Amino acid sequence: MTGVSATLGAVPPLLREPSALFTTGRKTSAVAGHLLTLWLAAALVVPRLHARRRRRVAAAFAQRTLRALGVSLRVRRERPRCDGPRLLVANHISWLDVYAVNAVEEARFVAKSETRTWPLLGAITAAFDSLFIIRGSCRDAARVKDAAAAALRHGDTIVVFPEGTTTDGTVLRRFYPALFQAAIDAGAAVQPVAIRYPNDDGTPNRAAAFVDDMTFLESLGRILTQPHLTAEVIFGPVIPAAGRTRGELAELARRHIAEQLAPMGCTVEPQVLRRPITRASATACM
């Protein structure tokens, strides 16, 4: 795996010691075996399962993937008291985000169309009913919005990353509101989810970030050479979509996520709204 070998030269000397290299090699073997098993299951078994069963299997595989990678998961949740489906919206740092959220939520994800071409993970992502979107295409965004709304009406939980890109965890970009319309059309609720990868001192662990021109194998190599990596997933209050615009929903969700990322020194880019959020529209269903 060229991504792993290319990364080793840049890591601290401690990680190049025999014991650290042995640990990394063991993790690499475990992850390779796990992904191969998952790929075979996605090709041969998963398509034959009922949709609800596929969601449960996806959640179980997500938990196993995190364990194989040596990623610890911490979850904090404000339990929703609203019945019905939810549109989960989260900041986006890494491909790990999908596994961190899926480990605790049986959900379908909106993924960029390029994900289909990734080795192993492309086929796995498709097998578990992801909704693929062509970034930068308004027409395709409308198509995916309609598909997400239909899935919400069917009772599915849908996860979107409205920044439309990944960051290194030090900035929260503006949220594109288009897919929030799916919650309005389906009469569903929106729930913000903040994702963090903190170091022991509370700063962002940038080894988790999947940014710029980094390949999947390069990202995997960076993660495998970490002595420990923690993913934190913080579920916020459920926000009913009724009576709100998609822009208001985007800002309300983003505001909660920004509050959770603030202790890590995260910079928040301005979010431009067509009209201000009123006190009434900011009331969340708890």
Image: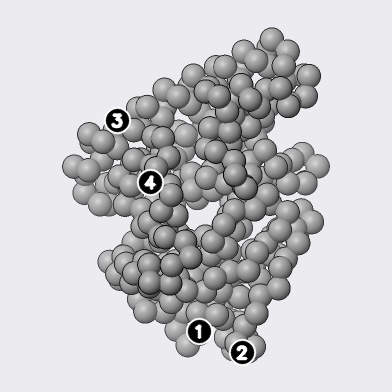
Q: Residue at x 25, y 52 (%)?
A: 51
Q: Secondary structure at mark 3?
A: helix
Q: Which residue is mark 4?
A: 116
> Residue 245 — which label?
1
Q: Quadrant of residue 192?
A: bottom right
Does the CB distance between marks 1 and 4 fall below 8 Å? no
Q: Position of residue 39 (x, y in %)?
A: 34, 33
Q: Position of residue 277 (x, y in %)?
A: 62, 86
Of mark 4 and mark 2, the one earlier in the sequence is 4
Q: Secondary structure at mark 4?
A: helix
Tag in front: 4 or 3: 4
Q: What amino acid type is highlighted by mark number 2? A: Arg
> Residue 275 — which label?
2
Q: Quadrant of residue 268?
A: bottom right
Q: What amino acid type is highlighted by mark number 1? A: Thr
Q: How many marks?
A: 4
Give the answer, above or below, for where 205 lies relative to 83. above
Q: Which residue is mark 3?
A: 40
Give the answer, above or below, for where 44 lies relative to 161. above
